[in-house]
Image (spheres, helix red, strand yellow):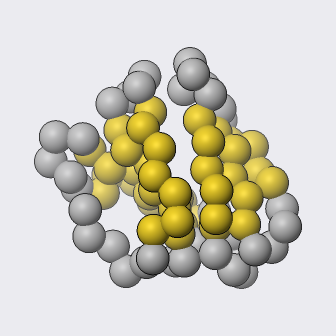
Amino acid sequence: MFEKTMFKQVVFNRQEFQVVTTGSARNISYWDVEGSECIRMIEGAQEGDINTLAITKNGEFMISGGDDKVLKIWD
């Protein structure tokens, strides 16, 4: 996996068989497990790094937090 960011968090989404990353580029990126290609990218913060990321066991929700001191819940 190559990205113009300093990776801060990597989690595995078991339901979708994807790796989800975040870091200094303020994006949340979804990666294909087999091909290691970025398949989706969303803006996770307007300023500062995203430092943490967690996914619920069923893969339905994700939470992110970063330097802007805002916790976001994603569905």
Residue drawn at the location 42% of the way across and 38% of the way down:
12
Q: Which residue is farthest left?
A: 35
Residue drawn at the location 24% of the way across and 41% of the way down:
33
In percent of width and height, residue 9 lies at 52, 57
Q: Which residue is farthest top?
A: 58
Instruction: State whether residue 13 is above or below residue 10.
Output: above
Residue drawn at the location 84% of the way across and 67% of the way down:
69
In percent of width and height, residue 7 lies at 45, 68
Instruction: State whether residue 17 is above or below residue 45.
Output: above
In percent of width and height, residue 34 lies at 16, 40
- Residue 68: quadrant of the picture: bottom right
Instruction: State whether residue 42 is above or below residue 74.
Output: below
Quadrant position of the N terminus in the picture: bottom left
Q: Nearer the viewer, residue 66 or 42?
A: 66
- Residue 48: quadrant of the picture: bottom right
Quadrant position of the C terminus in the picture: top right
Q: Is 69 displayed left or right of 26 in the figure?
A: right
